[in-house]
Image: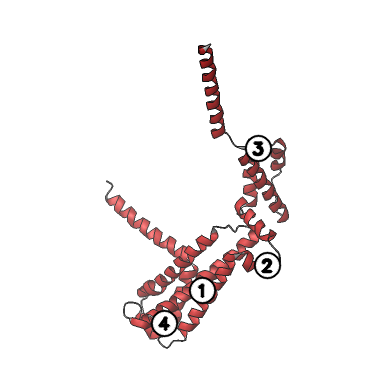
Amino acid sequence: MSVTKTNVAKENTSTTKIDATKAVFGISKEVTLELSKEINSMLSFAVYNGIIINTEVNQLLQNSTVNDLINAHNLLCKNIAPATPKSIKFTKKLHQENNQKSIFHKLPLLRNLVLLAVFFLIAYIATGMSTQVNNNSLDQGIMNNSGFPLLLNILYLSSIAGLGVLFYLLKEVSDSLKKGTLKPENSIAYLTQIILGIIAGLIMSEIISFYISDPQKINLFNKSVLALIGGFSSDAIFSILQGIINRIKGIFLTTNPS
């Protein structure tokens, strides 16, 4: 009897281990339910926006197996691109909130960007009105300027670079709302891009301007344009600098293969 009980206990233990393995490696019901919700959400988004849907999706949904749900999900992701299930869910949440609220209350990201744009505009006007910000002080640059005039000149160029990057981001947010591609984590990415835009504007206006052949051509208008372009195209400036660094690394790796 004791041997039989021991064998039964071993069989129960092995069965429990198999069930546990299935629970770990199998697809849970929660994931399957989430797949179904995202498929319905993408279908609704595609129908509402007049996006052409692959007819194979209907055949896959009729079978409702896990493989068919995954294939239907993949097809719909291609149909609605560049939108994603996450961005659709976020956009839908914005529309479902209280209609009496303004867009600034529904979308704090847009409100913060507008407030920053107003801040940089005020800073641009205030520093531009100063007599210490002029062609001569900007021609001197960071190396030949000092004290409070240097601070005002840097603030002036930084405010222009900030206006440039916010001009780009506000347009991107507007397009993202139309296309349904806005995501919650964009607020963090946009904050980083604002900082990069200001740095890129200062690099363009203060460093690249040194390579102009005629120093007399560096004036208030030219440096302002360089700062604006640097802020607006911070991604391009970063890509250019990254490409230069990669080439330099490639040279050293080629000369020193070890």
In the image, farthest residue toward the top: 1
Q: Closer to the N terminus: mark 2 or mark 4?
A: 2
Residue 126 visible at all: yes
Within 10 Å of disc 4 (Cα), the crowding (few <14, some 14-19, many 20+) is: some
Q: Which residue is mark 4?
A: 219
Q: CA distance from mark 1 to mark 4?
A: 19 Å
State whether residue 142 is above or below residue 44.
below
Q: Which residue is mark 2?
A: 101
The disc labelled 2 sits on which kind of residue? Lys
Closest to the camera, between mark 2 and mark 4, is 2
Where disc 1 sits, the SS reads helix
Q: Pointer 3: what residue?
A: 68
Residue on which disc 1 sits: 163
Mark 4: amino acid: Asn
Q: Position of residue 164 (x, y in %)?
A: 51, 72
Name the residue furthest bottom.
Answer: 131
Residue drawn at the location 51% of the way across and 61% of the way down: 188
CA gap between label 2 and label 3 equals 41 Å
In the image, 254 versus 142, the foreground residue is 142
Q: Check disc 2 and report its element: helix, strand or loop.
A: loop
Looking at the rendered image, the disc whose residue lies closer to the viewer, 3 or 4, is 3
Q: Position of residue 14 (x, y in %)?
A: 52, 23
Q: Residue at x 69, y 53 (%)?
A: 45
Q: CA distance from mark 1 to mark 3?
A: 49 Å
Identified at 45% across, 67% down, the residue is 195
Q: CA distance from mark 1 to mark 2?
A: 27 Å
Horizontal relation, residue 131 to residue 60: left or right: left
Marks 1,4: beta carbons within 8 A: no
Of the image marks 3 and 4, the number of the one nearer the N terminus: 3
Is 29 on the left or on the right of 206, as rendered? right
**Badge 3 amino acid:** Asp
Q: Residue at x 40, y 59 (%)?
A: 242
